[in-house]
Image (cartoon, rainbow, N blue to C red):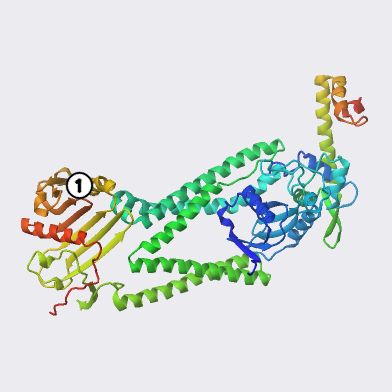
Amino acid sequence: MPRMKFQTLTEQMYYILLCLNSECCGIDIMDRITAMTNGRVVVGAGTLYNLLEQFLEVEMIRETKREGRRRSYVLTKTGREALDAERRRLWDQIGDYDRVFGEEGACEMTSEAVPSGLQPGCQRG
Amino acid sequence: MKIREHRYEMYTLYSYYDRAGMEEHLEKMASKGWMLERMNSWFWTYRKCPPKKVHVQIIYDPNASEYAPEPTRKQEDFRDFCEYAGWDFTASYGPLQVFYHVREAENRAEEPVRPCVERRNPEHDSEKWHPIPIETDPVMEVEVIHQVMKKRFLPINVLLLVNIFLAGRKIFPILIEKPLWAMANLGYTCIACSIFLAAVMIAVEIVSYFLWLFGARRMAERNQSLVLRGRTLLRRSVFYLMVFSLIYWFVSVKDFFLRLQAAGIVFLAACALLVSASVSRHMKKKKVSADENRVKSNGAAILAMIVSAVFLAVFLRWNWEKDGFRRNAETEVYEYQGTKVVCSHDRLPVMCSELLVVDDYQYRTEWDVRESPLLAQHEAKQYIKPGALGNEGYLDYTITEVKLSVMNDWCRQMVRYQYERMDEENPLERKYRFVETDADLWGAEYSCQIFVGEEAGFRHLVFWDGCILDLAAGWQLTGDQKGIIGAKIREFMESEYQWEPSCVLPVSKQ
């Protein structure tokens, strides 16, 4: 699988890890992501389950408790590093964009689509 | 009137990878009031219910096995996740897992609880919203499907293709070498054609699958899915043609022994399948591990096949001992040089005794008929029986009745063509030549004798309207003998199948 080693994270992987910053039941992650992204990112039940299993395997998350069949997880140091690496990659991409189009152009473009205060280029400036 | 509570349907009419086709069909069945209840390796079992609008999703689970006691803890967890998202696990067989999602907005007149997502099959689905699919990562989805197909669909189909190729090397040449035989044996020809079509279908499915795989991988990189769809129409056509051919062959074949053999093969396969399925079910109930179950059920199937094969062989042997399978003629059984000889004495349209001063009882005579709506072939053989006195030649001929007059010319060409094909290997000086002879002697439209190089052979081809005689006599026929044969064949053809091969020869005791 191309992304098995999680060198880069897809949006779904990114948000699953982000949700596990604090302990969370696996099933609840679906709702958390939907709420966090305003419904922009949705994770299917099967995809979520498989990704959690794979994250466990590479110790990016760990199981904290099991109540019946409800299992809870939390992010590990390795998981946090993967998230940070992805964040850096995204910033680098944005930085490259800004260098090409200039920050003002970027702000004009994003202000139409992204709520104020969440425009990455502007924040950075 | 009793209302049907259950309904069975053969889902193997869909390719193993035809997820979209199966999903659409199950959705349609639910809207007609049939919900899937369980499935096995061949059939879906539906349960009657009020008609419902549902979404169906089929998932391939690479870790699931039809031999494993279900559900494992992981499967339970997976199904819990799906259930939370509104997808209820319905049935599974091996890696194939079926989930239903009731369309809440329509069925309960409510807004959907979960947010809308992009529709997977927009051409089929007229709904405004669609539940979140179970799988939302296209890359992972493609790779998981491929993992399952590498284990299941590809090895089975490649093996089938190789088998068909190996079997086809025996089956198909007959159609080319003996076209008249093939036309008279339409059942056999249909089976051969359906096997050929099955090979084409399998090849098309394998190619389609790989085309999907490459396309899906490319699209997955752009975070898009490509619908995986099989060739349902082709698959169904081949399946129905195969079933029709087998039934037609079984009904039309005149040879009791062949019919017995075919029934025997079906019996063996049914025994093996039944035993394997029951052993596997029993082991699953006992929570035996998948590997142990696989070994034991397959072992039991092989054992069942061996036992039923032995039983069948004993039964056939007993039948052979009884009458050598020839129930339509008197059979003579005698010992010759310590070996048992089963010798039939069928009545033939023309017999050696009508042409030579011989006793027909010194010969074994065999009469065989094959018939289709296009052609009928009557094959007669009269050879000296083992241990008989004298060696006065033989008669070996085939009467081909052409039932459609438009096929007359084609059949005449084909009779010659059969010998021309046989002749291909012969050296130049032994090449066959068709030398026209006096057709009036036979009372026919045309006749010729086959010469091997310069030497006159024993074989004659004689054509009447709608009838072809291909005859070999173990001596050079005289004009009178040709006249007798011609008259007897015409008499036979005019008898409109009132011919009774069971009219056995009057037995002249030695």
Q: How many numbered badges does the structure rendering display?
A: 1
Please state which of residues B369 and B265 is positioned toward the viewer in this rendering.
B369
Q: Residue furthest right?
A: A117
The residue beneath circle 1 is B426
Q: Chain of mark 1?
A: B
Please state which of residues A120 and A58 is positioned toward the viewer in this rendering.
A120
x and y percentages locating residue B487 in the rendered image = 13, 59
Q: Is residue B410 above or below residue B338?
A: above
- Residue at image x 38%, y 69%? B260
| SS type, badge 1 | loop
Q: Is residue B237 above or below residue B319?
A: above
- Residue at image x 10%, y 46%? B454
Residue B252 picture quarter: bottom left
Amino acid marked by disc 1? Asn
x and y percentages locating residue B237 in the rendered image = 49, 50
- Residue at image x 58%, y 47%? B230
Relative placement, left or right, of B127 versus B393 is right
x and y percentages locating residue B44 in the rendered image = 62, 60
